[in-house]
Image: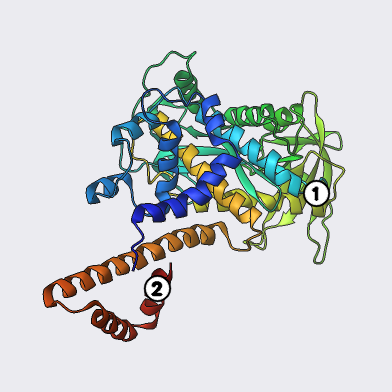
Amino acid sequence: MTIIPQDMIEDQQLNTSFLRFFSKFKVSKILNQCNAYKEKGVSVMDLFRYLFCIVFSHRSMYMQILTGSFKEDFSKNSVYRFLNNKKINWQKFTTLLSASIINGFIKPLTDDNRQDVFIIDDSLFERSRSKKTELVSRVFDHCTMTYKKGFRLLTLGWSDGNSFIPVNSCLLASNKDSNIYCDAKEYDKRTLAGKRRSQSKRKATEVMLELIDSAKASGLTAKYVLFDSWFSSPKTILRIKERGFDTIAMVKKSSKIKYEFEGEQLNIKQIYSRCKKRRGRSKYLLSINVMVGKENPIPAKLVCVRNKNKKKDWLVLLSTDTTISEEEIIRIYGKRWDIECFFKICKSYLQLSKECRSLSYDAMTAHTAMVFTRYMLLAVEKRSGEDDRSIGELFFRMIDEMLDITFNTSMMLIMQVLMDTVIEFFRIPENEMEKFMTQFIGKLPQYLQKSLLQLQTA
């Protein structure tokens, strides 16, 4: 009987799939372009690989050190220095990596007529038990409708309707000093650390445009930009149009936001009340052409649809591309749901905000980039294998495979030690011991017999 060492199992499970991803998309080269290079004796890729893979092993670094399973050639201080490195541009890293995946892998598999989109949304990055975390703020959680301590994780993603790839992000603190629990460290505003902290305190709509500019500069393109009503002010829509993108967004039914309709400046409710609605089971209630903006206005189409959650309520979608049909506007806006699934996967499976307990804003930015890279790997694996399983199922399948091998190996180790002990203590001949073990294994449950026989033949 041969015992498969744990190190070999980890190499087979992690290195074959993960390192293939690193090699194919040149992660090492992209890290170097983003100022992540070796300063002392430890390779940057060794540190990155360890942090990247740790979530798939179901063990934190603390538990690995505590149980003696931390077998790396570097210390925990090297990991902390890597995460806290203020010179590494993690926003640029995720942007360049996503561009490599989208342009080099996904787009060649996608028809040119498919309408790819940028999707923008934010989600709570919670730090509920820490007031000493750098820039941690009092932010509003839209799910629970309460205020919590943490950040708003503003994220820009790309989707073709099949695969969603996170492009870049920013952890937004409050722009009001009174809502910030712990002030940021002082850095020269010309440095990357200073710019990163300055960006975190700007308005979400301004940062959103910066993320789009960064994606565009890296070579990423999309036909539409999608977002919900939190970002859909006329000013934002005009600025996106200036950058060469059309917008499809849900807009607020606010009395303060007005559009030009039939020569008058009217809000959504006034326009809706003046127009005749479609009857029957139509996919939409109303479609109107309006002008958006007071200075240099642009044409847009408003599409009113039924609110499935409230029968008497209605929602409004706006498209700056007036050439497409109302049904197409509704269909394309449906792709925005991809980013909601992305946030769910990152928080439930990839340990977003739970894995990193550092007080440094730089470390939390690095952790976010690490989580985004893990999701990119899962998205690539799902797309390349044409896997119908969800990303969440794919994550658990990868973990389950590793845990099964670990369990089988442990059983094999116990059996080997038992055999050696019995032979040494009772001085039983090896041929008699083999008969005893064959009879013993035959009385075990079927799943244990199968596991042991698989390792015996390996």
Give amino acid for label 2: Ser
| Viewer can see residue 135 | no
Say which residue appears at 49% left-offset and 37% top-offset: 369
Q: Where is residue 423 in the image (x, y as percent from the top left)?
A: 18, 74
Q: Is mark 1 on a helix, strand or loop?
A: loop
Q: Where is residue 299 in the image (x, y as percent from the top left)?
A: 83, 35
**Disc 1, disc 2: CB below 8 Å?**
no
Q: Name the residue under label 2.
A: 451
- For the residues labelled 1 and 2, the Cα–Cα distance comes to 45 Å
Say which residue appears at 42% left-offset and 25% top-offset: 38
Q: Where is residue 260 in the image (x, y as percent from the top left)?
A: 80, 34
* Residue placed most toward the observer, 309 or 403: 403
Sequence order check, earlier mark of 1 and 2: 1
Relative to 112, is 293 above or below?
Answer: above
* Residue placed most toward the observer, 290 or 325: 325
Q: Quadrant of the N terminus?
A: bottom left
Judged left or right of residue 126, residue 250 is right
| Viewer can see residue 13 | yes
Judged left or right of residue 124, residue 95 is right
Q: Mark 1 points at which residue?
A: 111
Q: Is mark 2 on a helix, strand or loop?
A: helix
Q: Position of residue 340 (x, y in %)?
A: 57, 51
Q: Which residue of the protein is positioned furthest toward the left in this rendering?
A: 425
Relative to 337, is 198 above or below?
Answer: above
